[in-house]
Amino acid sequence: GAGAPAAPAAGSGPAAGGAPAAAAASDEPSLSLQQFGFRPSIFTRKGGRLVLNGRRLLFQPELAAASRLDACECAARALRLALALDEAEPLSSPRLVAFLDAASSLKAVRLDGLDEEQKLAFFLNVYHTMIQHAYSLLGPPSSLLKAISFFNTIAYQVGGDVFTLAELEHNVLRAPSCRPKSFFSKWVLPKSSYSFALTTADYRLNFALSCGSASGLATVPVYQPTLLGAQLDAVASAFLARTVAVSCRSGGGGGGGDAAVALTLPKLFQWYARDFGSGKHAMEGAAVAMEFLRGPERELLRSRLAQEQKPDLEIRYAPFSFACSRLIELEVGRESSGRRISGGGPGG
């Protein structure tokens, strides 16, 4: 990346871009992972994409062996290794080498046999692996304009195809969901199509996708198809507990003298309003948020949504922060609330 020292020239063997062990043999006892980068000419570029998981070139029989691996296990292992890296991981670290090799193995996995739940778990893990990989190597973007370039450039080769972070989010994971209600989205979002894209919408995806923004969660689980429902519910609860605010204010106009309630929702409820219902009424998003809240906030919100006439509820949207940080693993138990894995809204 820009400002990063050039890596040693690629040597013999299947490792592309120079082996980390060779870099560690320099006069510097330890280099941070943020300083480690390849020369731009070594990065694989396809359609303007900057492909990061190219340390190891897969030849036969490596390709044949990798194609027989379980795709979900490969993605889960890559994410676990990515989340285990220190911010200043030495280049000679076996953990770093293991992660880069695990990321490279994703190039050869087979996706044609995955069902919808397996694909959702697989691609969520790949997305967060890409985020952690890119932040460790290049650092997170610091502004909206830099974020647009970042998410439309950083890419992985997976299953014989290539996609950027933006393509993975909007053209694979969110393919059956709505496009964001944003003036700039029609110009900055990719229009690629992928045969392995998801076909069933799930509004909980809005809470599960994390770029480490201060407006959401910097903690992510390693998703498993058999625990997917419980994991998505747990992340939704944690996300909304952090980002939703419910408060009373005087001067409510409803019957019974009750104070009006102010509800602050994260910006994604406005951007992706049609994921939570028709997209025409902010109350639809409020109803989704209520399902995952706990304690007095839930009861206060429930009482207002139950009002037959216009509820004394003022809905606001918090601004989105582009201040991002590296991801941390979130341990999620096996308990599930029993919600459906897919669907456009509560009861949709």
Image (cartoon, rainbow, N blue to C red):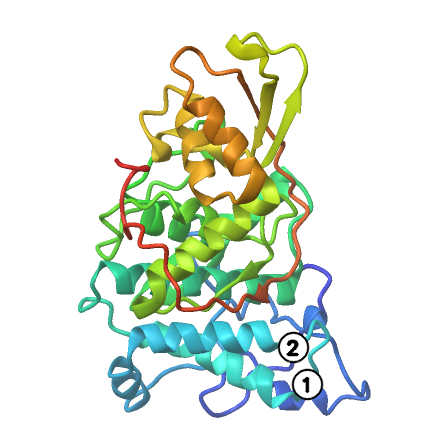
Callout 2–callout 1 Cβ contact below 8 Å: yes
| Relative vertical location of residue 210 with respect to residue 25 in this rendering, above or below | above
Crowding around mark 2 (Cα neighbors within 10 Å: few <14, some 14 to 19, many 20+) is: some
Residue 236 in the image, given as x and y percentages of width and height: 46, 50
Point out residue 301 in the picture as x, y percentages from the top left corner: 51, 30
**Which residue: 34% across, 59% down?**
229
- Which residue is tagged 1? 23
Residue type at tag 2 = Ala
Left or right, 316 with reference to 86: left
The answer to which of 87 and 281 lies nearer the viewer is 281
Q: Is residue 57 visible?
A: yes
Q: CA distance from mark 2 to mark 1?
A: 7 Å
Q: Residue furthest front?
A: 256
Q: Quadrant of the N terminus?
A: bottom right
Mark sitting on residue 7: 2
Residue plotted at (47% across, 26% down): 303
Q: Nearer the viewer, residue 36 or 317?
A: 317
Q: Nearer the viewer, residue 262 or 178?
A: 262
Q: Amino acid at mark 1?
A: Ala
| Crowd class of label 1 (few under 14; some 14 to 19; many from 20; radius 10 Å) | many
| The C terminus: image quadrant | top left
Query: Could you tell me residue 79's position as x and y percent?
Result: 48, 71
Q: Is residue 164 visible?
A: no
The residue at 56%/85% (across/down) is 97
Q: Secondary structure at mark 1?
A: helix
Which residue lies most toward the left here? Answer: 113
Q: Position of residue 329 (x, y in %)?
A: 56, 68
- Quarter of the image for residue 179 reads top left
Q: Is residue 71 above or below residue 270?
A: below
Q: Could you tell me which residue is drawn at 20 percent across and 63 percent down?
A: 115
Does residue 75 appear to the left or right of 136 in the view shown? left
